[in-house]
Amino acid sequence: MAVPSHFLDSKGIQQQRLLALTRQSGAHSGDNLATTLLRVVKEWEIQDRIGTLVSDNASSNDTCTTAFFRQINPVFTKTDMIERRMRCYGHILNLVGKAFLHGEDYETFEEESQRQNSSDTLPADLRLWRQQGPVSKLRKIIKFIRSSPQRSESFKILAQETDNQDDWLLHEESTAELQLTLSNDTRWNSTYLMIDRAIKKKNHIQSFLVQFQLSEGEGYGISAQDFLTAEDWRLLAELKAVIEPLYFQTMRCQGWGEKGSFGYLWEALSGMEFLLEKLEDWKLFFDEPGDDATTQSQVHLPCRALRNGRIRGNQSARVRSPELNTQALPLHVQEEFSLGPPSVAARLNVLSSDSRGYLRLSITNAWQKLNEYYTKLGESPLFAAAIILHPGRSLRWLETRWNTGDQLAWLRDAKEGLEGYWTAWYRDQANNQSPPRSESRPQKLRAEREDSEYGQWLGTDLIRLRNGASDATELERYLRLELPIEIDNPITWWMDRRQQFPTLSTLALDLFSIPAMAADCERAFSLAKLTLTTQRLAMNPETLEMVQCLKNWLRRDAINLGGIYFTPVTSADDGADL
């Protein structure tokens, strides 16, 4: 088990430390994971400093979170524990990418089968397409080339011969120098990188296959049926375009963060909003139009829910033309589709109906998987709170996104969730450490007013206004600010306002130290693999842990080996130096 910690130092700079890389004994059940995690936390004596746990979406981690928080703070309710369980944004993106490329969902099949009246054949057809479609063909070809040193060398030589670049490129690689990338089953983005690289080397791949078949003969290597057709290459280009936003979201949020951005909690909810909108645009674009002469097809997008099954309004549009209907798309998407030769509409119009149908089904699969975890984010108020307390986003960002129907209830829940969490764990605890505030009204002001009933009423109203202004909470005063504002670093903004918002700033800074992903756990395992080579397989697990922790602390400037000095100590027994 890798246990990294994230926090802000006294200067507001994000810090990350590897606390442990320890062996997990027994089954990887939630209770066993919690026992190991609790032991690590007790060794560091930070039981009272734990804010949240960030982990992937495995059910065992749900159990681990509950068992862990129950032991370090027995007063926590079940709701308190769920609120502090942060879901890894990277793991969600990985599941969405796999759902797009490989996923099979019964409800999606049922929905599409009703549309196409092919309930018995659609699942089998989709599986066959994914097994024998362009992505599978591409992977077979690349694996065939890379599996032999001779074929790899031949491909490299051919790429250099067919490359059109006559001049040396000092600022970038030529396409001939780029190597083919093979996908793996662990990370979906390896498939994206494989497709992206193959599109850049399309001419090289096609030339190699033709030349290899001519030299080796038919029936050897890649058969003609596995060659990528012009339709396959067009479909690969559209697959890449659809999943490209997922890839860039992964790359943006997997880091350690910089100035409160690029990998911190507020980017999870906003990023998922962005991706859901993108998928909805693509889904609408790929919906099969009806026949004008017979019927008008009603395109019905799935509903988006944030929490407790609440529906985020149905979105629909009528498609009247058998051609792709760009008018049904939002204006910014229409502009995007019309840019540059050839436009997206022109490219997609040449795709076969089968290809468009499979793309639509894959997009729906990805949408449903993303929406499933979008709903789960509502279990904790901290995802929305991180956006509200970001002065560059604030509550107005959510008001812009959630502005109709049941979405207005989301705003209320977001504000109440933030206020409840801040009141319970920050404001009330701070107030308990200081003398209680006097709630008595100043009577002297009323005596100075005229004795008439009207005069007394005016005086009482003035007192009420003054008390209302002084009794406004920190959260109320923050929400009254003219936000959002242009800001580079929200952490610096809150550090400068700690006196103005003493408890709310503490919550905000805590939120801005929470990473959006649990990527540091994966990094710890990957770096340990470089240490535990085939020549060091007998290394003691405790030694490996100490080495990896020291590496992490050195890279993070937590320790300075040059400042450590060893003084010889003489034993009283034998005089030997120890």
Image (cartoon, grey):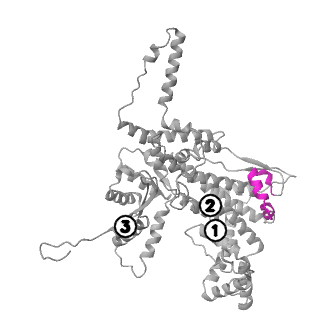
Q: Is residue 341 among the parts visible in the rendering? A: yes
Label 2 Cα crowd, 10 Å radius (few <14 / some 14-19 / many 20+):
many
Measured as percent of width and height from the top left, residue 321 is found at 84, 54
Q: Using the image as rendered, state which of residue 317 and residue 119 is in the foreground.
A: 317
* Corner quadrant of residue 157: bottom right
Real-space Cα separation, disc 1 to disc 3, in angstroms: 41 Å
Say the numbered circle drawn on residue 246. Answer: 2
> On the rendered image, what quadrant is the N terminus found in?
bottom left
Q: Relative to 140, is 298 on the left or the right? A: right
Main SS of the magenta part reads helix
In what element is the residue under mark 3?
loop
What residue sits 35% from the left and 46% below the top? 74
- Which range of residues does the magenta coloring cover? 324-348
Q: Amino acid at mark 3?
A: Asn
In what element is the residue under mark 2?
helix
Q: Relative to 497, is 104 on the left or the right? A: right
Q: Given contact means CB atoms under 8 Å apart, are the residues at marks 1 and 3 in contact?
A: no
Measured as percent of width and height from the top left, residue 142 is found at 65, 79
Label 1 Cα crowd, 10 Å radius (few <14 / some 14-19 / many 20+):
many
Sequence-first tag of 2 and 3: 2
Q: Amino acid at mark 1?
A: Tyr
Q: Given contact means CB atoms under 8 Å apart, are the residues at marks 1 and 2 in contact?
A: yes
Sequence-first tag of 1 and 2: 1
Say the numbered circle drawn on residue 192. Answer: 1
Q: Relative to 190, is 217 on the left or the right? A: right
* Corner quadrant of residue 169: bottom right
Q: Using the image as rendered, state which of residue 509 and residue 499 is in the foreground.
A: 499
Viewer-nearest of discs 2 and 3: 3
Say the numbered circle drawn on residue 560. Answer: 3
Sequence-first tag of 1 and 3: 1
How many numbered badges does the structure rendering display?
3
